[in-house]
Image (cartoon, helix red, strand yellow):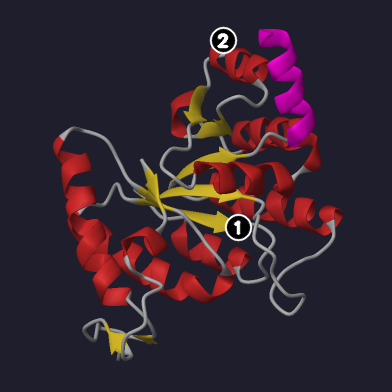
Amino acid sequence: MSVKLSMFGQALPSPATALNDGPSGPAPAFQGGHELALANVRPVVEAAAAIGTTVTLDAEDHTTLDSMFAIHEELRKDFPQTGCVIQAYLFRTEADARRLAEAGSRVRLVKGAYKEPAEVAYQQKHEIDKAYVRVLRTLMEGEGYPMIGSHDPRLISIAQELAHQAGRKLDEYEFQMLYGIRGDEHLRLAAEGHRMRVYTAYGTDWYGYFMRRLAEKPANLRFFLRSMVSKG
């Protein structure tokens, strides 16, 4: 299961709060419903662990990420299988990837779909693609479990090569794509022995999410329409 912390109250207004101080010094202060989101998402993570599955915390716009990463770190103390998402187009992501590429971590890498300012994110497709490859190399060479969230044929091919160079077995990383987009590629990767996870949006706001994914890469719309025609 993947969840957005805004669904659990992270964006609600409240006085600045902070996690307990840790060994590295005072914990950062967060505006909004940081503590509320942590309290509300924990039962979901507990329930997932009880039935043998995992929860991944989705990345939202850059202003929410420090809170998301802090909640991720807190949850991993009791549920180390809890995953998180990083976005290649943000300048900060290469440093985040180095920090997260540790044993036991589960990290999904996506390009990023939110409208971010030029001060914090790459704006051009070729820059984002290059950043994606750099970050993916860090994850593949690390000790965690990379999850490649992309429909881009070129990046999928590069991911396979980076995994080979890093000496990773097929069960030491996975591909993730949206249901309804590039279904033939889902089957091809699975037939080659790759772990292929199909991502299905649900809930009342599924349409907005789905449209952001299409907007993230215009080619996704072609893949989706082609899939509709083939099923028709």
**Magenta residues?**
220-232
In this picture, is 96 found above or below 195? below
Secondary structure of the residue carrying tag 2 is helix
Which disc is residue 191 wearing? 2
Identity of the amino acid at label 1?
Gln
Image quarter in which the N terminus is found: top left
Q: CA distance from mark 2 to mark 1?
A: 28 Å
Identity of the amino acid at label 2?
Ala
Q: Is residue 25 visible?
A: no
Q: Is residue 7 magenta?
A: no
In this picture, is 122 found above or below 118? above
Image quarter in which the C terminus is found: top right
- Seen at 77% across and 50% down, the residue is 129
Main secondary structure found in the magenta portion: helix
Which disc is residue 87 wearing? 1
Residue 106: image location, x then y, percent: 41, 47
Residue 88: image location, x then y, percent: 65, 57
Q: Earlier in the sequence, mark 2 or mark 1?
A: 1
Which disc is residue 23 wearing? none
How many numbered marks have been drawn onto this rendered protein structure? 2
Mark 2 neighbour class, 10 Å CA radius: few under 14, some 14 to 19, many 20 or more: few
- Seen at 65% across and 27% down, the residue is 181
Q: Is residue 60 visible?
A: yes
